[in-house]
Amino acid sequence: MALANRRFDFTPIADARWRLVAKELIFALLTPQHEAVAMLPRAYRTPLHLRSCNGRLEEATRFFGWLRQRGLAGVAHLDTADCEAYLAHRRYVTDDEGIVIGEQSHGVRRAAAQAVVDLVDSRELFTADRVRADLRPWGGATATAVAEMPSGRMGNTTEPVGEEILQPMLAAALHLVTVLGPHAVELQRQVRDIDRVSSQKVDGLRHSAPSFPEDIKAVLAEYTSTGTALPMLEDHDIAGRIADGWSPDDPLTRWQPEPWPGEPDTASSGPGGSRRCGVRWSRPSRRLVKRPCEPVVMSL
């Protein structure tokens, strides 16, 4: 999210009382469960997004600026005529001579009405200035109704999706859930298990474990006795080792020092146990692993 949407700028509101009103309003929109807000009968019960709160603050700033231009001493003097006048001010587009040449969108009109409705709905929260208790602009209608927004009032404005599109889409979604879904869950479990037994942070899986050399000897003996090829690195990883000084002719250069596929997913270090053997361990311990590794590697 852009930094501009994460910072609330109240400084454009010149009047200190109205600046405090704006702060208290944003507080109520962000924390509707606070005890000072929850008691309000018409307050929001779900926190608004930061972008939404920033939009409310921008419109409140315009409204307070408009009140200042009209010479109102405080929102306590606000009446229904002023509310109608502000809505008209925001609704119509005029030229330099004040002639109406168009209308703003429903969204602009809704934001303008919402700025007034917020001052009414959160009236009891404001400490520096508040509207009269009997003020009910537009007969208590919502900002959406005041703006005459078409959504939800004149039926669904979006045409339904045709069967020739909907049916294949639903069939594909059903296939993903019923056929591929179980495999994805099992794959996720395997990945978690591998992460658990290969993590350098897990106790007992570090290169310095006292039993690690004997564990590696046992596992390598199994690979040697069965003639099973050791897991190999990808070509780009081999190139990286050679760039680090490994010899291209060294059989260990191609060795994959990771948990080996097919071994039990256990944290124990016995024969067949899955252990992570990094380059930092394998290079200084070449005498331990090179002899059993070489015939297996060279058999590839």
Image (tube, rainbow, N blue to C red):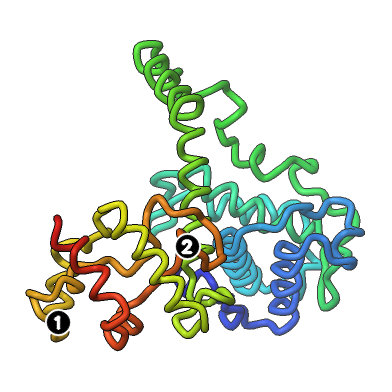
Determine the secondary structure under disc 1.
Answer: loop
Neighbours of disc 2 within 10 Å: few (<14), some (14-19), many (20+): some
Q: Is residue 96 left or right of residue 200?
A: left
Q: Is residue 295 above or below residue 214?
A: above
Neighbours of disc 1 within 10 Å: few (<14), some (14-19), many (20+): some
Q: Quadrant of residue 255?
A: bottom left
Q: Quadrant of residue 167?
A: top left
Q: Which residue is mark 2?
A: 271
Q: Quadrant of residue 133?
A: bottom right
Foreground residue among 261 and 298: 298
Q: Position of residue 204 (x, y in %)?
A: 56, 76
Farthest residue toward the left? 249
Q: Is residue 145 above or below residue 171?
A: below
Foreground residue among 187 and 294: 294
Q: Is residue 257 left or right of residue 246?
A: right
Q: Is residue 201 above or below residue 84?
A: below
The quarter of the rendered structure image containing the C terminus is: bottom left
Foreground residue among 76 and 2: 2
Q: Amino acid at mark 2?
A: Pro
Q: Tell me which residue sits at (49%, 53%) in the image.
A: 264
Q: Tell me which residue sits at (42%, 18%) in the image.
A: 171
Indicate which disc, 1 or 2, sits on the residue closer to the N terminus. Answer: 1
Q: Tell me which residue sits at (50%, 41%) in the image.
A: 186
Q: Which mark lies nearer to you, 1 or 2?
A: 2
Determine the secondary structure under disc 2.
Answer: loop
Q: CA distance from mark 1 to mark 2?
A: 28 Å
Q: Amino acid at mark 1?
A: Trp
Farthest residue toward the top? 163
Q: Which residue is mark 1?
A: 246
Q: Position of residue 131 (x, y in %)?
A: 82, 63
Q: Position of residue 192 (x, y in %)?
A: 52, 56
Foreground residue among 145 and 216: 216
